[in-house]
Image (cartoon, rainbow, N blue to C red):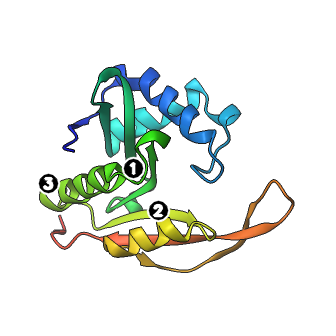
Amino acid sequence: MNYIIKNATASDETLILNLYKTVARISGGIARIESEITESYIKNNLEKSLKSGVCLVISHPENTQELIAEIHCSKLEPQIFKHTFSDLTIAVHPDFQGKGVGKAIFMYLLNYIENTRHDILRVELIARESNQKAIEFYQKIGFKIEGRFENRISNPDGTFEADIPMAWMNQNFKTQ
């Protein structure tokens, strides 16, 4: 199925909130639990992405008032990181996981950066160690593992696990 990927706007805030709440209900879906998905959390991410990064969405093919995917990243504040997109998060509706939606929106993001954002060298993300499927996917699309943050994640059962920092480099980066 072909999905229509578009740049998010401020008017997508409620739709993004609903998507994130749905995805957060799944264990391991995203790093936040449903009660942590607040209007201010979504608004902050959306504003940062619209101001200094990228935010993309895919509407439900049968209901334009529902999103099936969102991905965003933005620049960090200090100027020394001006060549970096960070805080990358992707959310795919549970009914559309495993159907190529995540790959489609992720590849669109990386192609957009490669072809239009020559000021960006690095795109960073962090994946929990137990999410091997995601780590393998990120590696297949060009991300490299850059280390481990030991015991960074506190699981509900009292165990701890590492977060895995990864980065992708834009081959078309140009210094300014």
Q: Is residue 111 left or right of residue 87?
A: left
In the image, residue 147 sits, relative to residue 43, either above or below, namely below
The residue that label 1 is drawn on is 73
The residue that label 2 is drawn on is 125
Front residue (pair 90, 22): 22
Q: Nearest to the eye among marks 2 and 3: give it.
A: 2
Give the structural element (helix, strand or loop) at label 2. strand
Asked where in the image residue 48 lies, by quadrant, the reply is top left
The residue that label 3 is drawn on is 116
Q: What type is the residue that disc 3 sits on?
A: Thr
Q: What type is the residue that disc 2 sits on?
A: Leu
Q: Please give the name of the residue rendered at 20% of the width and 37% of the height, measured from the top-left corner.
A: 4
Q: Where is residue 115 in the image (x, y as percent from the top left)?
A: 12, 58
Q: Please give the name of the residue rendered at 18% of the width and 62% of the height, measured from the top-left corner.
A: 114
Q: Is residue 94 left or right of residue 148?
A: left
User: Alpha-carbon neighbours of circle 1 within 10 Å: few (<14), some, or many (≥20)?
Assistant: many
Mark 2 and mark 3: span between their CA atoms?
Answer: 20 Å
Label 2 vs 1, first from the N-terminus: 1
Front residue (pair 108, 123): 108
Q: What type is the residue that disc 1 sits on?
A: Cys
Image quadrant holding the C terminus, namely bottom left
Mark 1 and mark 3: span between their CA atoms?
Answer: 15 Å
Q: Do the residues labelled 2 and 1 touch (CB within 8 Å)?
A: yes
